[in-house]
Image: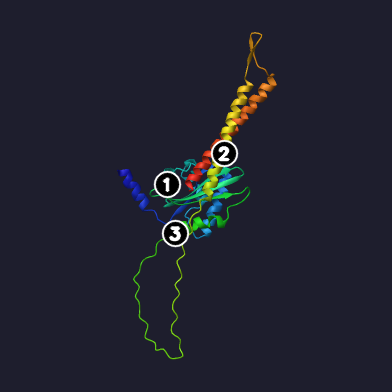
Amino acid sequence: MLVAVLLSLIVGSVDSQTAAVLVGRRTSVSQAEAEAISQAVSAHLVAAKVPLTLDADAARASLNKLGLKDASACTGRKACLTELGRQLSVAWVVALSLSQVGNDRALALELVRVADGVAVEKDALILAPGAKVSSEQVAGFASRALQHLTPPREDRPVVEVPAPPKALTPKEPPPATPIVSAPVLPAQRSHVASFVLGGAGVVALGVATGLLVSGLNTRAEAYRTSELDGALRSPYPASEVQRRASAGGVQLGVAGALAAAGLGLGTAAVITW
């Protein structure tokens, strides 16, 4: 009970307009590449007037000073990310999830409230080989995040002072009727990226299953023996046995990597839906 009270006091004392950018998950993406992408996203958010207290580089440096590991060790878990947010004394965490999809890279963005771990905004995008994150790709997420991070306007009473009566002369036209513009409805979020990630995950798992079966069969064939002259002998020479066993091992290794990538893509698809 005492711990819960202390946590509520700590969260309550943090400015509600503070935020930090963290790489909460990376799958088959190097740390250097993740740092470059996260810092580019930070720059686009700042350019869009999103009030970041700590960009990706500053947040990573602050975690190192606190003796904490890289945020990607959280593997996307909200409880872990919110705890890092409390350690950084921010009210919001912009969590990035990076994964390799064939030659492309998938990037998922979430705006997570540290107080309760709820992701109030989500978005996803695909980066072609060698492509960098553009401001247009981040603009939609930045606009929605800005609504949460901008302090609400104070409601002040408006005193209307009536204008003095003005006599209309025959030559003076009557006042024009004000034109009221129709409200602009917010665009609905597209789920195309989620379908792409999910489809890629299914393909990766299917290929992994095929390679797993092929690898097991190849290794079994390499070590197959038959009885000849009262002794168990292989029908292949030693070099052929070694070649088949090596080929089977390679297929099993590739199957494991594709299965991990497929699971990561499936998770990203669920997060960004």
Q: Which mark is residue 60?
A: none
Q: Amino acid at mark 3?
A: Gln
Looking at the picture, does residue 256 appear above or below residue 83?
A: above
Q: Amino acid at mark 1?
A: Thr
Q: Residue furthest bottom?
A: 170
Q: Which mark is residue 82?
A: 1
Looking at the picture, does residue 181 appear above or below residue 35?
A: below
Residue 56 x/y as whole percent: 52, 50
Q: Residue furthest left?
A: 1
Q: Is residue 24 visible?
A: no
Residue 161 x/y as whole percent: 35, 79
Q: Are marks 3 and 2 in contact (CB under 8 Å)?
A: no
Q: Could you classify mark 2 by the number of other residues whose Cα lies within 10 Å: few (under 14), some (14-19), or many (20 or more)?
A: many
The CA distance from mark 1 to mark 2 is 31 Å
Question: For mark 2, what is the residue?
Answer: 204
Q: Amino acid at mark 2?
A: Ala
Question: For mark 3, what is the residue?
Answer: 147
**First of labels 1, 2 by sequence position:** 1
Q: Are marks 1 and 2 in contact (CB under 8 Å)?
A: no
